[in-house]
Image (cartoon, rainbow, N blue to C red):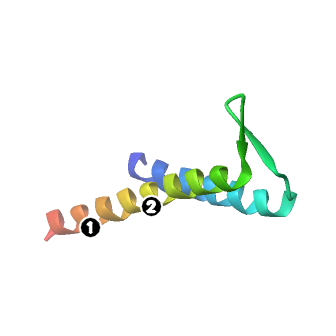
Amino acid sequence: MKKYVGLILAIIIVIDVVVSFISNRKVENVFGVDMNVWLYRFLWSGLAFLLVKGFIEGLKENNTNQK
């Protein structure tokens, strides 16, 4: 279950970024700080990429250990 947490968070982040395109705002509020929507999308997309990358590396590591 622990290895799937990163994947679940990445999916939630991707949904949030997609919703940010639909809502058409100029500024997003992140932890009480107003942020340009493009910077917001870039940072969250980068985090989602890193989470998915870690998940895939974990799967590859697990597959090599099983052989």
| Residue at (85, 53) in percent of width and height | 25
The amino acid type, in three-letter code, at marker 1 is: Lys
Q: Distance between the residues labelled 1 and 2?
A: 12 Å
Indicate left or right for 66 with 4 as reference: left
Q: In this view, does 40 lie above or below 58?
A: above
Query: Looking at the image, is mark 1 or mark 2 earlier in the sequence?
Result: 2
Indicate left or right for 58 with 3 as reference: left
Q: In the image, which disc is placed on residue 1? A: none
- Residue at the spot of label 1: 60
Q: Is residue 35 visible?
A: yes
Indicate left or right for 32 with 56 as reference: right
Q: Which of 18 and 39 is in front in this view?
A: 39
Q: Residues within 10 Å of mark 2 (few under 14, many from 20)?
A: some
Indicate left or right for 53 with 66 as reference: right
Considering the numbered disc 1 on the image, is that residue within a helix, a strand or a loop? Answer: helix
| Residue at (63, 51) in percent of width and height | 39
Q: Nearer the viewer, residue 39 or 15?
A: 39
> The C terminus lies in which quarter of the figure?
bottom left
Which quarter of the figure has residue 18? bottom right
The amino acid type, in three-letter code, at marker 2 is: Val
- Residue at the spot of label 2: 52
Residue 54: where, in percent of width, then height? 36, 57
Q: Nearer the viewer, residue 29 or 7?
A: 29
| Residue at (59, 57) in percent of width and height | 42
Q: Which residue lies furthest to the top in this view?
A: 32
Q: Which of 54 and 60 is in front in this view?
A: 54
Residue 7: where, in percent of width, then height? 49, 56
Residue 22: where, in percent of width, then height? 84, 63
